[in-house]
Amino acid sequence: MRATVLEGPRRVSVRDVPDPALPGPEGVVVAVEHTAICGSDLHLYHDAPTGTGIRLGHEAIGTVLEAGPRVRTAKPGDRVLVSGVIGCGVCGPCLAGQPNLCLAGKAAAFGTTPELPGGQAEAMAVPFADLFALPIPEGVSDEEAVLLTDILPTGYLGALRASIRPGATVVVVGLGPVGIMALQCASLFGPARILAVDMVPERLARAERLGAEPIDARMAPGSAQVLEATGGRGAECVIEAVGADATVADALACAATGGTVSIVGVNLSPAMAFPMGMVFLKSLTVRTVFAPVPGTWAALVPLVQSGRFHALADTFTHRMALDDAPEAYELFDSRADGVLKVLLAPKD
């Protein structure tokens, strides 16, 4: 089969690899119909920190080709969406939909290590399918299903863990795909204002269409503009959706004294200078999370089905064939041509 393979920093290829095998009696093999490039894929794309030869991708939906004898929730021919994050599949947290807390230390995202090949491919193996592969619910489109594999749950958790109360002021730092999901989810909790910080004009315009107040960080630091917009106080609730050292620091600076900063942008840098003095003196609550995707489906699927989110399919600004993955990565990384998120189709 064909799969997207990391060849080195800023180099991917689409090449023939061995077909996936059934990953045990609780697993399934899925023929991938749609997959996507995520912002966290760019961490691998930029630096290849976990090595070359990785089959990329953790956002995928498709049709079950083969199911193990212990799989109860899906059979061959069923269409499923796959959690981007999985665990051991047998411990208490995994069984409760919290694979990020896996007691066996096996929490991982597809397509980040050689041991867990990803979904930017014609097919993928999914262990413990009853936990980590959800039959696509009625009333959920393919695009919405892809978003439910990772970035909509991540944005939702970013908003949930920001402790948003009715009437609060919220800041979302970073308006990439996760930031846009976080912005929409923040609205569920009844804030009075949502301020949206980015440097890309198209992303600022999208946030404004969704009801946020855009803040262009090219003009001045986002935190300085947030303080001006809030009379010097800052925001009670801040969601950081980028993961860069600078944006994490800016998010902390945006927060009001006693506020909460929810960080869902991926930052694995051991060298980051954390502004502990400011966090301490402002009595901030800082939360981070490696998204437990399955644990969010009970809340998010009904919200998607009822139309509570605005035009989720529009998140995908570009649609390309799997064989065009190298060009798709270059485009997504460049932020050119108004790109927000790229949908790949193995069969196109």
Image (tube, rainbow, N blue to C red):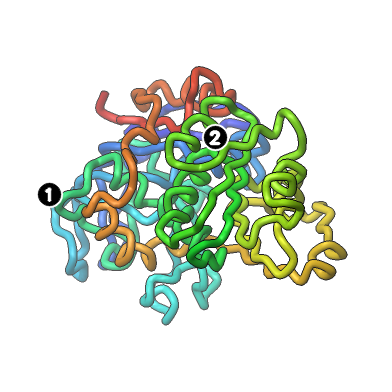
Is residue 300 left or right of 328 when viewed as pictured? left
Determine the CA span between mark 1 and mark 2.
30 Å
Query: What x and y, as percent, mark residue 130?
Result: 26, 67
Q: Amino acid at mark 2?
A: Leu
Up/down of 121 relative to 266, above or below: above
Q: Amino acid at mark 1?
A: Gly
Up/down of 315 relative to 168, above or below: above
Query: What x and y, as percent, mark residue 164?
Result: 53, 64
Give the secondary structure at mark 1: loop
Residue at horizontal 61 percent and vertical 60 percent from the top? 237
Q: Residues within 10 Å of mark 1 (few under 14, many from 20)?
A: some
Query: What x and y, as percent, mark residue 115?
Result: 49, 53
Quarter of the figure that contains the C terminus: top left
Give the secondary structure at mark 2: strand
Does the rendering let one see residue 117? no
Which label is found at residue 6?
2
Residue at horizontal 48 percent and vertical 53 percent from the top? 155
Nearest to the observer: residue 215 or residue 307? 215
Q: Give yes or no for contact between labels 1 and 2 (Cβ–Cβ under 8 Å).
A: no
Q: Residue furthest bottom?
A: 92
From the image, tell me which residue sits under label 1.
77
